[in-house]
Structure formats: structure tokens, C-alpha cells
């Protein structure tokens, strides 16, 4: 049994948790966040890829049971009015113009003008060119934290039943986005302090100045979760793309985490993710399958039926299809089993409405579980900012880490397949014959599970067919900036070259007043872990 977690190589740190669990789908997460926010004493710190100021955190009967504000910004304003000691920090990715029509406009005005001055909203433009800030973290008073795949916005809300249609998905009674699946973690204990430190570093790198959260003593912390995880050590793994302004070294812990976990697999690998286009993960799977003297694997993918938007079908859909087809071929050659699926509900007209899979989870042999923000794409492993939490069992016996990782995986498989009967749960639990069993469910078409068609609308287009994954700039693993240029700038941070590059970059990408001063040290939470360079 190979040990997977290795601080300095594939994780930043391992820290303790007191209470920890998963929140499955936004119905559970948004409600848990709302109730945790009601108890905040000194601060609520939130960072994410996307926010909506008016998203309803409670809906239906839950909303009807309270007189308190249930929408995001009105709730934060109400909490600040009630508690003069409360501060709210919101850090949002300064998104690409390509996404402008999909985002709420004028967010800086909505969150900063006419609201309590203790609500501070910032756009973070410190990501690499063509990169994004994709970490999703909430820290409350340094005693409770949420992190995972979920942003707080209207288009992500759904219940675990994922009905084909639902009036609760939108306040107008329409159903704008269909079934939507995601997973978040919630935790207490010393690990929360590391997430607070990470937030402080992100705030500083965004140009918001030095931020130091107060120490808060609370004895009323309660944790809500859909399913429990094992308390004790958890590993935090990061991705940060390399940048010149501000000076951000490359951090690729999540990349190494996935590769090392795949190499350690002896029985099965379960992956549910929004995309699959990472060359590093593809190569790790192929290498593991081609090892002649090791056990055969059952490898299960649960993915969306198709990428959400046209740009994503162009950027990653074609690459995904090519890589997944290649994995199937390697599995057939080597005797491993690979199953690739999606999930759907049938509407009143008999038409499938596919559940959009937005979660980022991998389980290996039920002894390793990682949940976070990182997609299995090139950019998530080397360019965007990402954060994953991981649990590992080093025991040969069926300990609490294994039992709870298995419980989460089995529960998710029951959700996606639509099968929670005892016969199905037995197969899911033991994982032997897993792909054959799931193939049978998908072929029958009587439950939720469907075969993934491994096609996109562009797949057979002669203009796109010659493209290889690396031909498309929308999913790079590294910054477009040359590495040698970064090193030159880093060595001469206070000199003529650095000043000139700062002015040029600010002019090109509009980062004026958003980057920290060049002569200030980079926060430790943004640097590679000690020993990481040697490990790489």
C-alpha cells in the first residue's frame, strides 16, 4: 500500500479537524452557510469564482419559516446592522469579458455602494493571463469553514433528487438551468486557521493590503452536513499559476496529488468531475493500466453529458472525447475496466434532462478521498487557483476514514444511478464488478444512469477534428508568460526591469492599483510548500 499524501510535494500542509462532513448539492450547502452566517461574531470571509448578490439561500418551506433575510447581500447587510462588530470580506475573480453576459453586472457597486462600510468587496485580477481564480472558500470567525466545488449563485441551486423540472431552481418559477450537482466540505478545528491564512494571502495578492483576522472564541459552533467524514488530519493542496504582477511562484500540488493517487490505486478509481482534459491525469491513468505486474482496476467516470457553453465545447469538449476514447482503448488492451457515464431525469414528455456534474471528487480504493475546486483539466492543475482537501487511510483494516469515504462514494453513486436498493448498494460497496454492474444500469435505461456518448457537437466537424488538446489555448497548463521572463523579473523585483514590466503589464491587462507593491514579501500561504522545488 503506497502512501499518497506527501507535504511539500502534493499538499501544502496536513492539519487537524474536529468536525468534518460533506454537503451534497446547493440545497444543503446554501442552507448550512445561511445558518452558520447567522451566528458569526467577528467576520465572514468569502472567495469564489462567481457570486450573485440576490441569490436565495433558503427556498420553499425553509424560507417561509424565517423572518430573516434569506438572500445573499440582504442577509449580509442585516447581519451587519444587528452586529456592529461583524466584518464581511468578499473576494471575487475579476472575470474574463467572455463571461460578462453570464455574470451579474456592477457587482462592485452592488456590494460596496449603499451597503454597510463593513462589507468589503474586491475583484481579484492577480491570476495569470488567461487564468482564473477558482478557489471557493468561506471562513467564519476562524472556527468554521466551507470549501469545495460550489459558488454562491442562482444558477447552481438544486436538491439531491435532481428532478427533471423544479420551480425552486428559480424565483420566477422558471427552471433556467435544469438538474445541477455539486459537493462542498465543511469543517472545524485547526485546519480552519490554515484556510483563514490562505484567504489573508489571497486578499493581499489582490491588492487589498495586509489583512489579519482576529482570534475569536466561540462555544456555539455546530456543523451541518449531508454525510460525515472522519475527523482528524486533512491535507490541503493548492494550485497557483505563475505570475509577474504580483510575483506568484508556480504551485502545482493538486496536479501531483492526482498523479500520486492514481499511481497508488490497487482496486478502483472513482472520479466525478466537470471536465476531463488533463494530459497529466490521462498519462497517469495510462501508465498505471500498463503496469504488467499490478492488479486490474475498475475506473468509473461520472461527467456532464456535454460542457455547459459553446466555448467550453470548443476548449475542452473535443480534447475530452479524444482522451476518454483513448483510455477505453488502453483498458481493452490491458484488461482493465473503464466506465464513463452521465446522469439524467426523464421529464413528462419522456425527454432526458441531464444532471450537470460540477463536483470535483476522486476516491481511490476507499482509502483516499479528495474533494475540492480543481477540475481534471490542464488549467486547473497549473494555471488557475485551486484548493482540494484530502483524507487518507494508512490502515490495512476497515477504519473510520475508509468507512466514511465509502459511505460518501456509495451515496453519490446511488444519487447518479438512481439505484439505492440493497442489491445495488452491495455492489457499490464492494466495488468488484462495478463497471459491469453500472453498464447494466445504463443499458436498461430505467433509472438515472446513462452511457456517456463521448461526442460533442464539434466532434465530427472537419475544421476541429485535427486539433489535439494542446492546440487550444483555453485549456493550457502553464501561463503564456515565458518562465525565463518570470525568473528575470523575480531576481530584479525592485530594479529597472521590474518597474518597466509592471507598467507594461498594467497597461496591457488593466491591473492598476490591484497588485501589491513589488518590494513587499509574498505571503507564505501563496508560496510553494517547503521542499516543493526539490520534490518537483
Image (cartoon, rainbow, N blue to C red):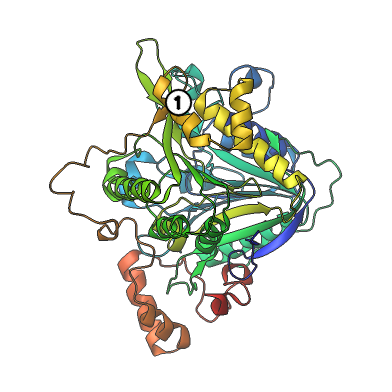
In the image, 518 versus 407, the foreground residue is 407
Q: Which residue is mark 1?
A: 440
Q: Residue furthest right?
A: 219
Q: Is residue 532 above or below residue 66?
A: below
- Left or right, 298 with respect to 116, comes to left
Is any part of residue 366 visible from this angle? yes
Q: Quadrant of the N terminus?
A: bottom right
- Left or right, 306 with respect to 249, comes to left
x and y, in percent, of residue 339 in the image: 43, 38
x and y, in percent, of residue 434 in the image: 53, 35
Secondary structure beneath label 1: helix
Residue shown at the point (39%, 63%) measured from the top left: 477
In the rendered image, which quarter is residue 525 located in? bottom right
x and y, in percent, of residue 134 in the image: 48, 53
Q: Residue furthest left?
A: 462
- Left or right, 319 with respect to 407, comes to left
x and y, in percent, of residue 40 in the image: 74, 43
| Label 1 neighbour load within 10 Å: few <14, some 14-19, many 20+ | few
In the image, 462 versus 436, the foreground residue is 436
- Left or right, 116 with respect to 465, comes to right
Is any part of residue 24 visible from this angle? no
Q: Residue furthest top?
A: 348
In the image, 453 versus 145, the foreground residue is 453
Residue shown at the point (67%, 62%) measured from the top left: 197
Residue shown at the point (58%, 58%) measured from the top left: 264
Q: How many marks?
A: 1
Residue shown at the point (53%, 82%) measured from the top left: 519
Amino acid at each position: 500500500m503506497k502512501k499518497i499524501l506527501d507535504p511539500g510535494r502534493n499538499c501544502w500542509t496536513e492539519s487537524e479537524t474536529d468536525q468534518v462532513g460533506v454537503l451534497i448539492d446547493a440545497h444543503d450547502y446554501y442552507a448550512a452557510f445561511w445558518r452558520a452566517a447567522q451566528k458569526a461574531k467577528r467576520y465572514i470571509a468569502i472567495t469564489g469564482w462567481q457570486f450573485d448578490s440576490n441569490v436565495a439561500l433558503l427556498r420553499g418551506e425553509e424560507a417561509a419559516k424565517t423572518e430573516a433575510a434569506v438572500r445573499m447581500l440582504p442577509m449580509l447587510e442585516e447581519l451587519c446592522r444587528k452586529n456592529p462588530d461583524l466584518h464581511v470580506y468578499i473576494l471575487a475573480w475579476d472575470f474574463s469579458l467572455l463571461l460578462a453576459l453570464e455574470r451579474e453586472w456592477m457587482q462592485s457597486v452592488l456590494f460596496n455602494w449603499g451597503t454597510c462600510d463593513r462589507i468589503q468587496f474586491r475583484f481579484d485580477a492577480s491570476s495569470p493571463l488567461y487564468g482564473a481564480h477558482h478557489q471557493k472558500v468561506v471562513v467564519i470567525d476562524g472556527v468554521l469553514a466551507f470549501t469545495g466545488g460550489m459558488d454562491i449563485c442562482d444558477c447552481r441551486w438544486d436538491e439531491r433528487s435532481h428532478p427533471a423540472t423544479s420551480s425552486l431552481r428559480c424565483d420566477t418559477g422558471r427552471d433556467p438551468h435544469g438538474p445541477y450537482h455539486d459537493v462542498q466540505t465543511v469543517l472545524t478545528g485547526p485546519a480552519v486557521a490554515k484556510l483563514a491564512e490562505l484567504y489573508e494571502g489571497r486578499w493581499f495578492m489582490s491588492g487589498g493590503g495586509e489583512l489579519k483576522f482576529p482570534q475569536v472564541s466561540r462555544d456555539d459552533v455546530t456543523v451541518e452536513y449531508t454525510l460525515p467524514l472522519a475527523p482528524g488530519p486533512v491535507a490541503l493542496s493548492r494550485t497557483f499559476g505563475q505570475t509577474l504582477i504580483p510575483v506568484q511562484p508556480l504551485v502545482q500540488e493538486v496536479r501531483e496529488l492526482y498523479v500520486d493517487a492514481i499511481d497508488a490505486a490497487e482496486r478502483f478509481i472513482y472520479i466525478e468531475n466537470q471536465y476531463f482534459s488533463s494530459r497529466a491525469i490521462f498519462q497517469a491513468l495510462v501508465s498505471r493500466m500498463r503496469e504488467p505486474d499490478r492488479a486490474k482496476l475498475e475506473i468509473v467516470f461520472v461527467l456532464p453529458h456535454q460542457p455547459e457553453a459553446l466555448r467550453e465545447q470548443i476548449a475542452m469538449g473535443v480534447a475530452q472525447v479524444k482522451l476518454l476514447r483513448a483510455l477505453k482503448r488502453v483498458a481493452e488492451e490491458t484488461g482493465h475496466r473503464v466506465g464513463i457515464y452521465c446522469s439524467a431525469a426523464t421529464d413528462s414528455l419522456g425527454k432526458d434532462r441531464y444532471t450537470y456534474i460540477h463536483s470535483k471528487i476522486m476516491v481511490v480504493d476507499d482509502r483516499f478521498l479528495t474533494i475540492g475546486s480543481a477540475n481534471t483539466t490542464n488549467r486547473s492543475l497549473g494555471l488557475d487557483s485551486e484548493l482540494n482537501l484530502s483524507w487518507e487511510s494508512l490502515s490495512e483494516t476497515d477504519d473510520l476514514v475508509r468507512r466514511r469515504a465509502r459511505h460518501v462514494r456509495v451515496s453519490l453513486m446511488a444519487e447518479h444511478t438512481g439505484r439505492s436498493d440493497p442489491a445495488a448498494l452491495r455492489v457499490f460497496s464492494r466495488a468488484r464488478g462495478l463497471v459491469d454492474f453500472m453498464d447494466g444500469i445504463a443499458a436498461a435505461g430505467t433509472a438515472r444512469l446513462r452511457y456517456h456518448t463521448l461526442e460533442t457537437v464539434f466532434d465530427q466537424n472537419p475544421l476541429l477534428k485535427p486539433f489535439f488538446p494542446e492546440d487550444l489555448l483555453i485549456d493550457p497548463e502553464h501561463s503564456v508568460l515565458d518562465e525565463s521572463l518570470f525568473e528575470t523579473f523575480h531576481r530584479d523585483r525592485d530594479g529597472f526591469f521590474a518597474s518597466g514590466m509592471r507598467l507594461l503589464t498594467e497597461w496591457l491587462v488593466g491591473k492598476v492599483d490591484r497588485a501589491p507593491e513589488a518590494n513587499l514579501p509574498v505571503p507564505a500561504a501563496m508560496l510553494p510548500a517547503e521542499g516543493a522545488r526539490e520534490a518537483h
